[in-house]
Image (cartoon, helix red, strand yellow):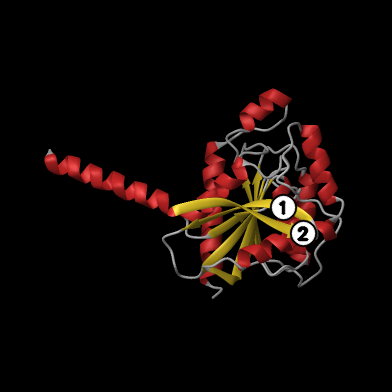
Amino acid sequence: MHRIILAVALFALTATHAAAAVIGEPVDYLVGDKRFTGYLARDDGQTAKRPGVLVVHEWWGHNDYARKRARMLAELGYVALALDMYGDGRQAAHPQEASAFSSSVRANLPEAKERFLAAMRLLQEQPGVDPARIGAIGYCFGGGIVLEMARQGLDLAAVVSFHGALATEMPAAPGTIKARILVCNGGADGFVKPEQIAAFIDEMRAAEAAFVFASYPGAKHSFTNPEADGLAAKFKLPIAYDEKADQQSWNDMRSLLADVFANRK
C-alpha cells in the first residue's frame, strides 16, 4: 500500500511539474502607431530551438479561448502566439459587434496582412523559436484569415483552419502558396455552403497547393469551442460544440504540424 501511495504521489508531482513548465503571458506590440495585445505561451523547460505557431482568434476577438489554444500548442512543444487582429485586445460582446469588427478587417486585406506579419515577426524573434519553422491556425474568422495569408504566399510551413470562412475575393495564383493547408470543416456548418466548398477545392487545385479538406459529419459551426452551446442559446446562433469533432480535428492538426516541421529544418 505504501508503494502504491508513493507511486501516486510521484505521478501527481510529475504531472504538476509538467503543467507548471508551460507558461503564458500577455505581450504588447505595435503595428504602425497602434497597440495590439497578444498572448505568448511556451514550455519553459525546453531550451532547443523549436517551431512557432500563430493562433488567430474567432470573430469575438482575442479572448481566453484563443489563449487556451496557445497553451495547448505549448504543451505539444511549440512556442505559440495568440495574436490580436482588432487592436488593443478588443472583444465583441454581441454578434453584431463581432460581425462589424471582423468585416472591417476582411474589407482591408493589405492591412490585415500587415497586422498578421507584425505578430509573425514578434514570434520569430522570441528566444527558442526557429524563425524558419512557423505555422498558423485559426478559428472561425481566424480560420479565414490564415487561409488568406496562405493565399498571399506568406512563408508559413503549415496553415490550419477550424470552421473558417472559405470564400475569398483574392484567389491564390498558381505556385503562390507555400504552406501545407488543412481545413477542418463541420459537415453540418450552415455558414459554409456546398458551393463555397467546391469553389475552394477548385481554387486550391488550380493553385497547385498541398491541401486536405476534412469534413466532420454532423458537426456545426464553432464545433471546437465548448462555449458554443451557451452562445447559441444566448444569441440564437446555429452553432454547437462537438467533442468528437473537436478532438479529431485537433489530432489531425497535430499530425500535420509534426510532419511539416519534421521535414522543414
- Could you tell whether 144 is left or right of 50 in the image? right
- Name the quadrant containing residue 123: bottom right
Residue drawn at 57 percent across, 57 percent down: 80
Residue drawn at 60 percent across, 71 percent down: 131
- Could you tell whether 22 is left or right of 65 in the image? left
Q: Is residue 264 above or below residue 248?
A: below
> Residue at the bottom extreme?
265
If you read the primary sequence from the N terminus, does the residue marked by circle 2 or circle 1 appear first?
A: 2
The spot of residue 163 in percent (x, y) is 67, 45
Q: Which residue is mark 1?
A: 36
- Could you tell whether 179 is left or right of 41 in the image? right
> Which amino acid lies under the numbered mark 2 shown in the image of this protein?
Val
Q: Estimate how packed mark 1 is, as few (under 14), some (14 to 19) or many (20 or more) residues with alpha carbons within 10 Å.
A: many
Q: Is residue 18 above or below residue 101?
A: below
Disc number for residue 31: 2
Visible residue check, residue 139: yes
Visible residue check, residue 216: no
The spot of residue 262 in percent (x, y) is 51, 70
Q: Are marks 2 and 1 in contact (CB under 8 Å)?
A: yes
Of residues 211 and 50, which is closer to you in this image? 50
Disc number for residue 57: none
The spot of residue 13 in percent (x, y) is 30, 47
Quarter occupied by the N terminus = top left
Residue drawn at 65 percent across, 39 percent down: 222
> Which amino acid lies under the numbered mark 1 shown in the image of this protein?
Phe
